[in-house]
Amino acid sequence: MSDTRRGFIAGLLGAAGTLAVSGPLGAAPLARVKELGVLRVGLYADNRPWSWEAGGRPKGIDADLATAIAEGLGVRPEIALFPADEEISDDLRNVVWRGGLLGFRRCDLMLHVPFDMQLAAREDQVVMVAPYYREDFTAVCSSQTRDCDMPPQRFVGSKVGAELDSIPDFYLTGGFGGILRGDVEHFPTGYDAAAAVHDGKVEMAVATRAQIEAAMAGRPDSRAKLRKSPLPMLPSRGWDIGMAVREDSRSLGFAVEDIVMQMTADGRMAAIFEGHGVSWQQPEATRSIG
Amino acid sequence: MKGIRKTLVATCALAGLALTVPAMAEGPTMDELMGDAESTSDVLTYGMGPWQQRFSPLDAINTETVAKMVPAFAASLGGEKQRGQESQPIVYDGVIYVTGSYSRMFAFDARTGEKLWEYNARLPDGIMPCCDVVNRGAAIHGDKVIFATLDARLVALNRKTGKVIWNKVTGDYKAGYSATAAPIIVKDMVITGNSGGEFGVVGAVSARDVNTGELIWNRPVIEGHMGTLRGQDNGITGTTNATWPGDMWKTGGGATWLGGTYDPGTNMVFFGTGNPAPWNSHLRPGDNLYTSSTLAIDADTGVIKWHYQTSPNDGWDFDGVNEFIPFDGTFNGKKRKMGAKADRNGFFYVLDRTNGKLLNATPFVMQPNWASKIDLKTGRPVFNPDNRPGAPGDAEKGKSVFATPSFLGGKNWMPMAYSPDTEMFYVPSNDWGMDIWNEPIAYKKGAAYLGAGFTIKPIAEDHIGALRAIDPKTGKIMWEYKNKAPLWGGVLTTRGNLVFTGTPEGYLKAFDARTGKELWKFQTGSGVVGSPVTWEQDGEQYVAVMSGWGGAVPLWGGEVAKTFKEISQGGSLWVFKLPR
C-alpha cells in the first residue's frame, strides 16, 4: 500500500512539471529535523475541533496528531497556529514553502491540507502526503425539529446557521432560489454554527461533519439531531484531508506518511478522533487503492 | 534610590519648563494645516491641503527650467525591508518625514539628507497583509507626527525624537483589521478609516483626540450599525436591512482603507468605502449600502450628510475608496462647489459636494464594459448583465466573464491631482481587464470552497498605465501619457505648469500640464509608487518622492507581470532641485 501511495505522489509531481530537485532525493530535510530535534508543524488557528488555542496551548485533533507524528520521529513538536488566508494557495505559501512577509517562519509540515489531485497539480512548490480523514458537509437540527432530513428550504422562517463565506453559507443563502436568505445566521466558524443549534439560537446548521460531531459530543444534553440523508444539490461531495511538506522535503513527507499509516492500522488514529467526539472516516484516496 | 529621585526631580522640572513654552513653538497649528495648500515653505498634510488637490503655487521649477533639475540628495531607508514605498513626504522646519514599508517612520534633514531618527513598529508575526506591507504617509500636528501601522494601530511620535507619545489600537489585527492610509487632522482630531480584507470586517471612519488618541466619534459605514459620539450612541447608519438581506450587514465589508479628504467650507470629511462582502454579488441582492460609495460625514459629530454610491451591488471587487477631491469652478455656466472622484470602476464622477448630486460621469479608461454608462438622471450605472460574474453554486467551472476594468481598478489607491490654473484633473489610470470564473476546486481553511479565478490582462498593445488630463466640466480627456507598466504612484501639479508622477520603471517624470509633453525624467533605481511633493527652502524650490517598487501589482502574475519583471526592489527618498 505504501508503495502505491508513493507512486501516486510521484505521478502528481510529474503532472505538475518536474521542478529541479536539488541534490540526492531530499535526504536532508528528514535528517535536519532529527538533528535539530524539533518538528515545526503549522496548524490553522480557530479551527475547532481540529486546532485551536485554549489556555495558551494548542488543542484539537490536528494538535494531537502533530504531537504523535513528532513522537514517531523521535523529536519534539513545535506547533505554530496561523490565521487562515483567503485560500489554500496563500496558506501553503505562507506556511510551507516561503514563510510570512512579516517574519512568520515556515513550517516543516502543515496539517489539514486538502488531498486533491487537481490542487496538487497546481501547487508545485509543495508535496501533498498522508491523507488521514474524509471530510464532508452535513446538517444538525435542534431537538424540536420534526424531521431533520427534510429539504433545507422547508426550514424557511426558522433561523439556520452557517460559517460566514463557506459552502454551507453559499448553499443556504444562494440555494433554493434564495428562499432562506433572510433566515441565515452567520458565524465565524462551522463549529460555532453547530454549537448554536444546541444553544437554541438556530434550528438547523450546515457545517462539516467533524464540526457537527464535536459540537454534539460537547452537549449531549441538548438532544440535537444529526441529519442522516445527504443534503440535496450541495456543491461538494466531500474531500480528503492530508498534509503538505515543501517540494524539497519529500524524505520527511514519506516518513510522516509511514507514521500516519501505522497509526491508522493500530487504531491510534481513530482514538485521537474519538477523544474529540469525532468518528474517524477513512479518506477516499486510501480506500480506492488500499 | 537617590539617583532615581534625582532623575524624577529633573524630569518634573523639565515638564514645568515645557508648560511655559507657548504651544506655537512646538510645531504646526491647525490653522497652518488648513492653509497648507497656499503655504509654500512646507508640506504639512497628505495631499498638500485639506482638499488634497496636490497643487503647489510654486513656479521656479517650470516648463522652461525643469529640464535642468538634478538630484540634491537621496536617502536610503536601509535594512532588508525593501518593499513598496507608497508614502508621501511631510516637510516641516527643515525636516522631511516619510513612512516606509513594514510600518516604519523616518526623519531626514531636509538640507543634507542625513537621518535624524527612525521608528520601527514592532509588528506581530501573525499578520498576513493581503496587499503588501505598505504605508502611505504621516500627519503632523504640534509636536507630533502620526501614522498608522499594519497591526491596526495609530502611533503618535515626538517629531523631534521619534519617541512614542501615544499608541492606540484602532482594530483587532487578529480579526483581519489593518491600516496603511495617511491620517488626516481636522479640528484637533485625527480622522482615519480602517482596512482589512478578511471576512467580518466592517468599514468605519473614526475621529480621535490628536493629543491623547482617545476616540471622539466612530461611524460604521454599513447600514444597521450604531455610530458613537463621545461614548454615547449617535444613531444607526442608514436603515437596517433596507439594502442587505438577512444578517449580512453585520459582516458587510466596506472598509474605508484609503482615508479621506476634508472641506472646511462645508465642515465635511469625504471617505470612500470598499466593496461589499461576500464577494459574489448574487448572494446579497440589493444595493448593499454604503459599500462602494463616497460618504460625506459631518466632521464634528460623525453623522453622514450624504452618500453617492458608484457601484451598487458591486460584483467586480471594484470598491469605491478612491479619493474625493473638492474643487470650485463653473459647471454648465453656473458657479458651483464640486468634488471629483476617479473610481476603481473606470468612471470619473463630478458631484455637487454640498449635497452629493451627480453632475457628470464619464469613462476615464479604455472601454469599461461592466456598465454601458452612468445615467445622469438617476445617478446609477446602466449595467451590462452579461459582464457580471456568475452566481456560485455550480460544481462545474462556471462561465468565464471578461470585465473591464480589472478588479485592481481604472485607478487604484494612487492619488490624482487638480490644477486650478489649467482646471484639469491629472489621473494616474490603468487600462486592463480580467477574466473571472467560478472555481469549483477551491479550498479555504482546509474545507471545500467555491472560489473565483481571476486573470488580469492588458487590453492595449503598447501600455497598461496612462496618466490622463481630464476636463471636469466635460469629462473630456485633454491629453494622455501612456506607460508600459501599470501606474501605481501619486501625482503632483504646480503653477510652473507641470505635472509630476512616477513609474514602476523607476522614473520620476515631469510633463507640461497643458499638453502632456514629457519634459524631464530621472531614474531613481527602483519603481516609483509614492506621491511627489514640492516646497521652497532657502529660496529654492525642491521636489521629493519615494522610490521603492511594490504594492498590490507585483502580487498578481499573468500577462501583466511581464511589464515589470526586471524591476528591482528599493527604499529611498529622492530630493531634487535646480542647479544653482
Image: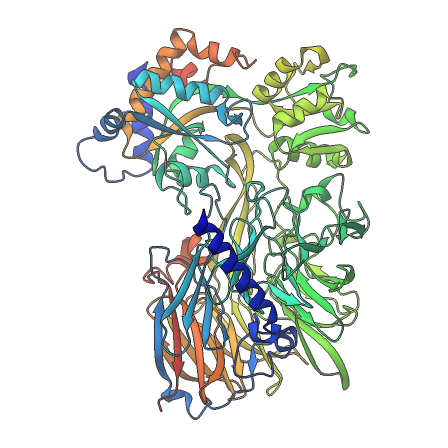
**Closest to the observer, B232 or B220:** B232
Relative to B57, say whether B109 is above or below: above
Q: Position of residue B256 (x, y in %)?
A: 63, 56
Q: Nearer the viewer, residue A38 or A288?
A: A38
**Which residue occupies the foreground of this view, B308 or B208?**
B208
Residue B372 is situated, as x and y percent measured from the top left of the image, at 66, 64
Counting labels gives 0
Taking B477 as reference, is A199 above or below it? above
Is residue B413 among what the camera can see?
no
| Quadrant holding the C terminus of chain B | bottom left
Residue B310 makes an appearance in the image: yes
Q: Residue furthest bottom?
A: B64
Query: In the picture, residue A24 is in which quadrant?
Result: top left
- Which residue is at 75% across, 47% downward? B225
Q: Residue at x 68, y 70 (%)?
A: B262
Q: How are the residues colored?
A: rainbow
Q: Is residue B518 left or right of residue A182?
A: left
Vertical placement of residue B433 versus B389, above or below: below
Residue A197 in the image: state x and y as whole percent.
71, 22
Name the quadrant containing residue B326: bottom right
| Residue at far front of view | B2
In the rendered image, residue B490, in percent from the top left (x then y), is placed at 51, 70
Position of residue B383 in the picture relative to residue B36 (left or right): right
Q: Residue furthest top?
A: A266
